[in-house]
Amino acid sequence: MPALLLITSLLVCLGAAAAHAAGPVGASYPGRRLSRMPLPAELTPLTSPAGQTMLFEAEYRSDALALLASYVAQVNGAFCGPASSVTVLNALAVGQPLQASGTYLDEPEYAYYTQDNVFDADSERVVPRSSVLRNGMSLAELASFLAAHRGVNASFKHGSDMSLQDFRDAVVSAIAQPQTFAIVNFLRSAIGEVGGGHHSPVGAYHATADSLLVLDVARYKYPAFWVSVNALYHATLPSVSDGQDRGLVFVWAPEGEQLRVGPQYIMAGVDDGHPMSTGPNHGSSSSDGSSGFPNWQMATAAVASFMVGLGVALTAAALLSASGFVTISYSGFARQAKHEEMATLVQR
């Protein structure tokens, strides 16, 4: 009986866990928080089933695949610029610096950009670390900071210098080009989030939704999210609250190459992140108009319902057995036959 109750409890717990798999937990313990700030309804978190499906469907996504491998959270409230820089620099095919001595990682084979060693003598002459700690970075400062690193090119463009279509063409063409990345500087409150100006890399473009994937480096605050191009563009325009003119920073390698952004550089197949086709429908929607990817939310709900139902049924059976109304044979007819044989021997 205790074993049955234990199994029943586990099934109910697993079912409850599966039922919550599609959404944030939201519970908290002293000193810890298990959920981030809620995203506005107009934004789609990458971690949601819809957000993941959008990434699979995105026409241009290879930047996201490269950036997610080196995606870091900013270590303090002023370091969205350095964190975005580290994420992009580690995704570029450029030389990387040694890590700090005493870490047991200060060997050439462990060279990697961090939010410490991204500040070096060259970058200090452009944007000192002490200044970043006090004031963060402007759009122009971030571009200068990135360009100070060996093998790296960087430039910027203000939102006010672009039309909506110019903005779309520029950021999508950057995503489409190999070894070219875009970082957006936007006003959080303009897209319904809490906060002020913020830098984060852009990883993918979904044409049907006309949305961009922003890899938010304040990962403790918001997850990576999809936002419409229109909303993000307007979040880069001069704001009434602080008058700052925000926009895009472009980062590319190798050093000395010209920046190639604009509609003429948006070419499907150049750097779109799709694997090689294995069939006529690979990477596209199925013939009935569905996305071709499983609906994980429905599958999760079905599994949750089954497990909770099974757990409830076993609980009821255990209670009835304990009360004497029902006798349960745990091992089936084989064990029942064995018991009958033993009873006969006792009677003899």
Image (spheres, helix red, strand yellow):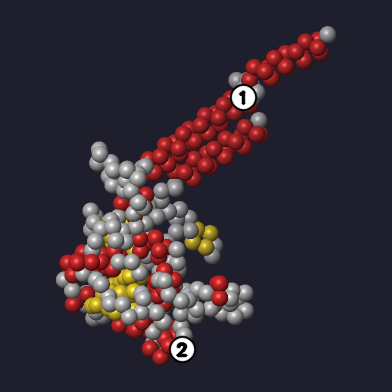
Residue behind mark 1 = 321
Is 170 situated left or right of 98 in this image? Answer: left
Q: Residue at x 40, y 63 (%)?
A: 66
Closer to us: 338 or 189:
338
Task: Please indicate, yes or no, whether residue 269 appears anywhere in the rendered image.
Answer: yes
Task: Please indicate, yes or no, whether residue 324 appears anywhere in the rendered image.
Answer: no
Is 253 situated left or right of 342 in this image? Answer: left
Q: Quadrant of the C terminus?
A: top right
Q: Position of residue 51 (x, y in %)?
A: 34, 54
Residue farthest toward the right in the current orientation of the protein: 348
Q: Residue at x 57, y 26 (%)?
A: 317
Q: Amino acid at mark 1?
A: Ser
Disc number lying in front (2 or 1): 2
Residue behind mark 2 = 121
Q: Quadrant of the N terminus?
A: top right
Q: Position of residue 69 (x, y in %)?
A: 45, 63
**Mark linked to residue 164:** none
